[in-house]
Image: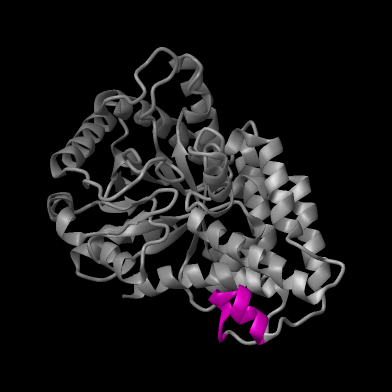
Amino acid sequence: MSDFFLDLPGARRAGRRMGITSVCSAHPAVIRATFRHGRIGTEPVLIEATCNQVNQDGGYTGMTPADFRRFVLAIAAEEGFDAKRIIFGGDHLGPNPWRKLPAEEALAKAEIMVAAFVAAGFSKIHLDASMGCLGEPEALDDEATAHRAARLAGAAEVAARDAGLPPPVYIIGTEVPTPGGATHALDHLEPTSAAAAKTTIAIHREVFTKAGLEAAFARAIGIVVQPGVEFGHESVVRYQPERARALIAVLDDEPDFIFEAHSTDYQPVDRLAALVGDGFSILKVGPGLTFALREALYGLDLVASELDPTYRGRPLAEAMEALMLAEPKNWQSHYPGSAEEQHLLRHYSYSDRIRYYWPHPKAEAAVARLMAALAGRTIPETLVSQFLPRAAGAGPLTADGHVLFAVEQVLGDYAAAIRG
């Protein structure tokens, strides 16, 4: 499946529209919806895990790369989805999980992590060594970043060889949008300058060549840049192609590259389509999928309150509020404002930090109670209209079906954008 990525730059050069959605989530319902949606076509499906989600220490999911692959493949088997169509990607692979350590220690751990991803069959690797470690600046310059990226690529090349696997394709460059969304009010963003993008490519090319990694760099097909898209807690900055013209022109000078766009969540279909047409061939989405999932679950919470006399109020929302207040580490430093403002952000922010809580046993128990209250029921159209507007006109659906349908709708927007 790495051939798919190697074909992306050539497709752009030939004027052929070609792209892929990168699903960045470890939520089982999101993965399941991805495969259900993917069954309608023949294209590959790209599932990615970040270095914080999944690593040799377990990450915040508790999964190693091999565990994550097994987890995804098990859901694919349940859905009857051909495993040969799945591409596994590793996102932001670098020292970030260990950046409080001295650089050498953090990089040694990052090498182990990258090797574990590749050995587990992850064939798309985003090398992100841009962050400073203990005693270093918060962000490193291109030279230092490239040297560290080359070191990680070297570990990946050895891991692929030792595992008897095809060597991976690489994405270079630093994510300019803040992971998980911005933490301040947004009105517009400046795209990455053409000069900055060219410099990043040139320095990586030189450093990889000097390190004897020319073959690896030949498989570096994408660079992460800021196209001028982002989402904050309560707003979304939409793509404006005219503002990115100079950046887009870089691909004419670097025809072996395409762009990877992060934080494309909540972009309208026409803007997503414009991104693909302009060379942003890889569209990453994560919080936008779990935001849709949360909308469906909260709608079902209200539906159950109407249908089941033993299920009154908003038990799921109340359980999630209690959980987030008891364990605030995943939202407290991100959501400013008064107690009332923080309450709204905890549940309804576009940055969707509630997604970190769904795997918690208390959240799982609350969702299980909700699903039990709705088991065997087909939700009336009138309640769908009132509480589940995404599914208006979708026909009869079970509670589980509404959750998956909400996620599939978002994926459908991306598929439509890629088709143009």
- Asked if residue 167 can be seen in this view, the reply is no
Q: Main secondary structure of the magenta part?
A: helix
Residue 34 falls left or right of residue 218: right
- Residue 180 screen position, x and y as percent: 46, 45
Residue 13 falls left or right of residue 82: left
Which of the pair 310/296 is nearer the observer?
310
The residue lying at 36 percent from left, 70 percent from top is 269
Height in image: 284 above or below 97? below
**What stretch of residues is rendered in magenta?**
381-393
Q: Is residue 239 one of those drawn in magenta?
A: no
Height in image: 38 above or below 215? below
Tell which residue pokes out farthest to the right in this image.
310
- Asked if residue 25 can be seen in this view, the reply is yes
- Residue 411 screen position, x and y as percent: 48, 68
Report how many numbered discs are placed on residues in the image: 0
The residue lying at 22 percent from left, 59 percent from top is 240
Q: Is residue 388 one of those drawn in magenta?
A: yes
Q: How is the image coloured?
A: one colour
The residue lying at 39 percent from left, 30 percent from top is 129
- Residue 245 screen position, x and y as percent: 14, 56
Quadrant placement of the C terminus:
bottom left
Which of the pair 133/190 is nearer the observer?
190
Which of the pair 268/98 is nearer the observer?
268
- Residue 47 screen position, x and y as percent: 52, 56
Residue 318 falls left or right of residue 164: right
* Residue 299 location, quadrant: bottom right
* Residue 274 location, quadrant: bottom left
The residue lying at 51 percent from left, 47 percent from top is 165
* Residue 284 location, quadrant: bottom left
